[in-house]
Image (cartoon, helix red, strand yellow):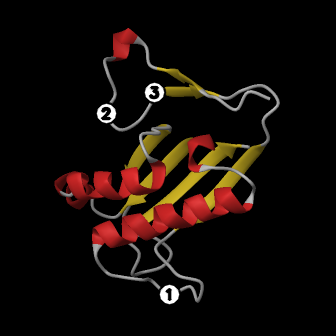
Amino acid sequence: MNKSFSFINPDALGSPRGYSNGVLAPEGGRLLFIAGQIAWDREQRIVNSDFVEQFNQALTNVVAVVREAGGTPEQIARLVVYVTNKEEYAARTAEIGERWRALMGRHFPAMALVEVKGLLEPEAKVEIEGIAVI
């Protein structure tokens, strides 16, 4: 099976930065639905109160689920990032980008960023859910 995605970015939408407008999965892939991951460790404790550290840990947890299923970060087709403060996200995109590249390289799946009033875990500032094709 060809495990390569086709990235769909119509000229009419301009060039996306840090995401793809669409990702076409290869035939025969199995879908992995990744539950929302927050910045906690194996004891389910938030690792840090810093926004970027929470983003990093939440994305690390997403990648851990994908790897446990036998996949790689490049097989993540879609992510939804929930944040409690979109201004903080916007102000720290350079730092977030560094963490992203360390975990995901230059792989940019279809993505959405959603600001929410709060998350189930009161200390959480970021939650990331996704879909991978393994």
Neighbor class of circle 3 (other Cα within 10 Å; few <14, some 14-19, many 20+) is: some
Residue identifier under label 3: 21
Q: Is residue 66 above or below residue 123?
A: above
Q: Which residue is mark 1?
A: 45
Which numbered mark, 2 or 3, is in the foreground of this view? 2
Q: Residues within 10 Å of mark 1 (few under 14, many from 20)?
A: few
Q: Residue furthest top?
A: 12
Q: Is residue 53 left or right of residue 22?
A: left
N-terminal-most mark, 2 or 1: 2
How many labels, in total? 3
Query: Could you give the CA–CA distance between mark 2 and mark 3, rounded to whole angstroms?
Result: 10 Å
Q: Where does residue 56 sit, x and y in percent of width and height?
A: 40, 65
The amino acid type of the residue labelled 1 equals Arg
Element type at mark 1: loop
Quadrant showing the C terminus = top right
Which picture quadrant has residue 50? bottom left
Q: Which mark is residue 56?
A: none
On the image, the x and y values in percent for residue 113 come to 39, 47
> At x 42% / y 83%, what residue is drawn?
47
Q: Residues within 10 Å of mark 2 (few under 14, many from 20)?
A: few
Residue 10 sits in quarter = top left
Type of the residue with mark 2: Arg
